[in-house]
Amino acid sequence: MIVVAGEVDLEARLWEPEGEGPRGAALLCHPHPLYGGTMNNRVIYRVGKGAVEAGFAALRFNFRGVGASTGSYDKGAGERKDAAALMEWLKQRYPHLPLALVGFSFGAWVGLQVACHDPRVQALVGLGVPLNSYDFEFLIDNDKPSLYIVGTRDEFCPRDQMELLARRLPQTSAVSWVEGADHFFTHQVDQVQSRVRDFLHAQLEGHRP
């Protein structure tokens, strides 16, 4: 489907749980557009499946200039607008459900910035947080439930840097290390899917009346 998002049209795919319908909704942000990142990225696809298993509707999309999305790469500024517009779309479609955001690599940098400042987003997941490439200091002031999943051999997120950042994060944040995994979770995507599923499911349990 195509979602009109301000000055661009964004290609997106919505995946809903079967049965009673979703209990939450999650936006998934893919890796860097200039390096082959799309909504069909293997990790994004699998964490979308994990979100659905947790009871969330999962919305994958292509940033501007990717696939059938119009516009062109905008160094993160336009991409933040894309994420914000699709979060608004989710809110209108599911006005009474908790919202979450999952971002991988570049998508984590873009999406987490949007999610931290959107009061409607109640849970955050960052995958392969690329500390070598972008500034993630904004996470220090984020008090929403957050999970950061990083491989111990991630070439874009040195363990010492992530551990230094982790010590400055609020108690609502947690870092989950995937032993032996590189930046792309080449052999451990099953673990990533299950950890995202369990985290999001726990958020829903926390929203029970």
Image (tube, rainbow, N blue to C red):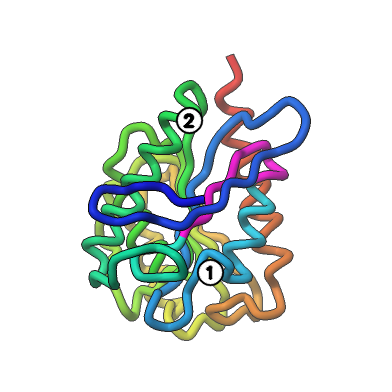
User: In terms of sequence position, does the residue under pointer 1 or pointer 2 come before the other?
Assistant: 2
Tell me if mark 2 has few (under 14), some (14-19) or many (20+) residues whose alpha carbon lies within 10 angstroms of its own.
few
Residue shown at 46% from the left, 48% from the top: 101
The residue depicted at 54 percent of the width and 63 percent of the height is: 149
Where disc 1 sits, the SS reads strand
Under circle 2, the secondary element is helix
Residue projecting furthest to the top: 209
Any part of residue 146 in sight = no
Magenta: main secondary structure: strand
Depth check: give the residue in front, 45 or 144: 45
Q: Residue type at mark 2? A: Arg
Category of crowding for the residue at label 1, using alpha-carbon neighbours closer than 10 angstroms: few (below 14), some (14–19), many (at least 20): many
Displayed quadrant of residue 78 = bottom left
Disc 2: which residue: 93
Q: In this view, which residue lies farthest toward the right?
A: 19
**Residue wearing tag 1:** 150
Which region is colored magenta?
52-61
Placement of 119 over or under 117, stated as above or below: above
Marks 1,2: beta carbons within 8 A: no
Is 170 on the left-hand or right-hand side of 11?
A: left
Name the foreground residue: 175 vs 42.
Answer: 42
Q: Inspect the magenta stretch and tell me whether residue 128 lies in it.
A: no
Amino acid beneath label 1: Val
